[in-house]
Amino acid sequence: QLHFVESGGGLVQPGGSLRLSCLVSGFTKDYHAIGWVRQAPGKGREGVSCISSGDGQTFYANSVKGRFTISRDSATNTVYLQMNSLEPEDTAVYYCVADEGSRPVVRYPQDFGSWGQGTQVTVSS
């Protein structure tokens, strides 16, 4: 069973920046991936970004390409999501997600089996 510690959400003005952090513990297999999925009020879940262990393969949704950057500290299994040029449309609950073994495909973090509790990101003036 995976355990998540998420932090970094909050309120920011349009054009501002935030950094989300997610520490995941409990992996038992060599390969894993950690990502972020968001859900805005009244909307479905959207896979935002993801990074794999090993070669560090990454994925970004088209809506965040060029504005968000995912990175990792492999020693601690901590993943960071640097969010720049934030827009009101980025307002959502952001969930850290993870999976391991043969299942995770970085392009589809919304299909991962383990989810954190979520952190609220609000972009508003």
Image: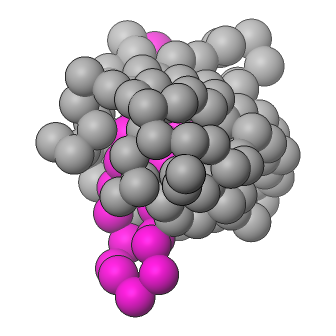
Quick check: is 52 in the magenta stretch? Answer: yes
Left or right relative to 79: residue 58: left
Position of 3 with respect to 85 (left or right) is right
The part of the image, by quadrant, that contains residue 81 is top right
Residue at (61%, 32%) from the top-left corner?
Answer: 18
- Return the x and y of residue 120 as percentages of the image width and height: 67, 60
Q: Is residue 1 magenta?
A: no
At which x and y percent is residue 5?
Answer: 83, 46
User: Extreme front residue here?
Assistant: 125
- In the picture, the quarter occupied by the N terminus is bottom right
Q: Residue at x 70, y 25 (%)?
A: 77
- Which residue appears farthest toward the bottom when viewing the image? 42
Residue nearer the viewer, 71 or 8: 8
44 horizontally vs 62: left or right: right
Question: Picture coordinates of residue 119 (x, y %)?
Answer: 70, 58
Counting the numbered discs, the total is 0
Q: Position of residue 44 (x, y in %)?
A: 34, 79
- Dominant secondary structure (helix, strand or loop) of the stretch shown in magenta: strand
Can residue 32 be seen from the camera position used here? no
Could you say which is closer to the camera, residue 120 or residue 15?
A: 15
Residue 45 visible in the displayed image: yes
Residue 107 occupies quadrant: top left
Which segment did they paint magenta? 30-54
* Relative depth, front residue between 112 and 119: 119
Q: Is residue 30 above or below residue 124?
A: above
- Depth check: 56 or 40 in front? 40
At 33% from the left edge and 26% from the top edge, which residue is drawn?
A: 67
The image's colouring method is: one colour
